Amino acid sequence: MMLAILAYSLTTGLSALAWNWESFAILRFLVGVGIGSEWATGASIVSELWPDHARGRGGGILQSGAGIGSFLASGVWLAIGGFGPNAWRFMYLVGILPALLVSWIWRGMPESSRWEQADARRRAAREMRRSGAALAGEHAALTRFTLLDMFLDKSVRRRLVFAFLMMLSVTFGFWGVATFVPTYVGMVAAKAHLPAPYYSALAGVVGTGVAIFGFVALGFLADWIGRKPTAMLYYAMCLILTPVVYLWTHGMTALLAAVAVFGFFTGGIWAWTPIWLPELFPTRMRGTAVAFCFNAPRWISAAGPLIAGTLIVGLGGYGPAATLVGLFFIVGLAAAPFLPETRGKPLPETLEPALPTAAASPQAV
């Protein structure tokens, strides 16, 4: 976590020194790598440190930081955005500040005892292998490359596939539908002879603001009624609300109200990931599996805005295009029932009996 925070903080600061669009794009790519790494680590450690009965609330609060951070960033931009054509460079320099968290993490955040125990088992299994012992089960798995282990373990592979599909659904749907809301509201305002920039910004503030409550509410619901029904509720609402916003709502007041409800679910839906994903995988691969399910779909869903933009032009408007892309939320709704309900259950460990003393050295045992 410390390395990831340093990576995205420093590359954000360096973005202020970009001299052309190529250097800027490379630096922003590196920022994304750091943020994706930090999120996976944060989700894993929160799941391992919070008690079983409240893990959903912990994940929801964790994810709400994204919305709170957006609000803070908006406030900073309001303060320095008028500093001339290079104001954006000052904005990126401010992005170095999260690096200050590293000192606090080093001194104030404990390492997960679950990870420490899994790491001790991994070291012991490797010592057994070096001593010539034949390994099986988790002992053999602990010595494999973790990314390979995820696909070789039959008990994990099914969960990996359906979690990947759920994540692909939310990333593709969000980036292909929800990100166009401010632009769409601005267009509607312009047609009504209202100040388009103002209403576009207002729609963005409303959508991201209510998303904070959507994150937290998902965590409480997940602890109350379960991970599976909560996730399916959010996916279903995203599916239903897309045409409500883009096709069926008329009038600026009604549209902003619809955007608020839409933002609650399309923003809040992300909170299932730090709650449910870590509960699907054993400790020996939790961080890697969470990172794969959360980040790999982004490579595919990066095409979402391009596809949506093409459809907007081809279909003659935001409404038909967004509704068509929004159908992708069906994938997450259909995949969720195939994952196990984990509410209130301990995190999976896949512990086996103690390592056999006859096959290993005394140091390994």
Image: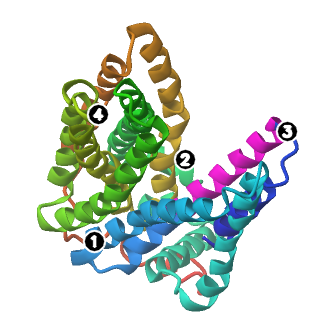
Badge 2 amino acid: Leu
Residue 182: horizontal and vertical position, in percent? 42, 38
Residue at 50% over, 28% down: 305
What is the crowding at mark 3: few (fewer than 14 residues within 10 Å), some, or many (at least 20)?
Answer: few
| CB contact under 8 Å: marks 4 and 2 | no
Label of residue 248 in the image: none
Pick the residue in front: 279 or 166.
166
Q: Would you name the residue on which mark 1 appears?
A: 57
Q: How many marks?
A: 4
Label of residue 329 in the image: 4
| Nearest-to-viewer mark from 3 and 4 | 3
Mark pair 3, 1: CA separation: 43 Å
Label of residue 148 in the image: 2
- Identify whether 172 is placed above or below 208: above
Mark pair 2, 3: CA separation: 39 Å
| Nearest-to-viewer mark from 4 and 2 | 4
Residue 37 counted in the magenta span: yes
Tell me the element at label 4: helix
